[in-house]
Amino acid sequence: MGTRPLDALLHAVADDLCSGVIIMDTDLRRVYHPYDGGADVIMADAGERDQLKAAHVGWLPRNRHGL
């Protein structure tokens, strides 16, 4: 099985081979903006945000703001 196109794109962003990538759902309510060294995520509402944060707490920065 080969690399899926989205995986290849995310690897290229992580390797700093491309930038300015923004991935959204079809309703434009959720946004994922990966960049070399991290990503910004915007969820549809605070509840979704909190669920995502709780599921991936190990990925968050360790400063007091979590940013």
Image (cartoon, rainbow, N blue to C red):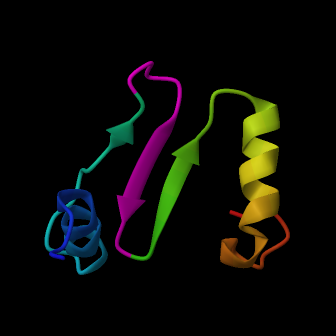
Q: Can residue 59 be found in the magenta stretch?
A: no
Taking the spot 39% from the left edge, 59% from the top edge, the residue there is: 34
Q: Nearer the viewer, residue 57 or 35?
A: 57
Quarter that holds the C terminus = bottom right
Q: How many marks?
A: 0
Q: Of all residues shown, which one is farthest toward the front? A: 1
Taking the spot 24% from the left edge, 81% from the top edge, the residue there is: 15
Magenta span covers which residues? 26-36
Left of 38 or right of it: where is 64?
right
The percent coordinates of residue 6 (x first, y second) are 25, 58
Q: Can residue 27 be found in the magenta stretch?
A: yes
The percent coordinates of residue 2 (x first, y second) are 15, 75
Taking the spot 17% from the left edge, 59% from the top edge, the residue there is: 5
Left of 36 or right of it: where is 51?
right
Taking the spot 36% from the left edge, 64% from the top edge, the residue there is: 35
Q: Quadrant of residue 23?
A: top left
Q: Quadrant of residue 27?
A: top left
Left of 43 or right of it: where is 8?
left
From what the image shows, is residue 47 above or below residue 15?
above
From what the image shows, is residue 48 above or below residue 13?
above
The percent coordinates of residue 47 (x first, y second) are 82, 35
The percent coordinates of residue 30 (x first, y second) are 52, 33
Quarter that holds the N terminus = bottom left
From what the image shows, is residue 46 above or below residue 35?
above
From what the image shows, is residue 52 above or below residue 31?
below
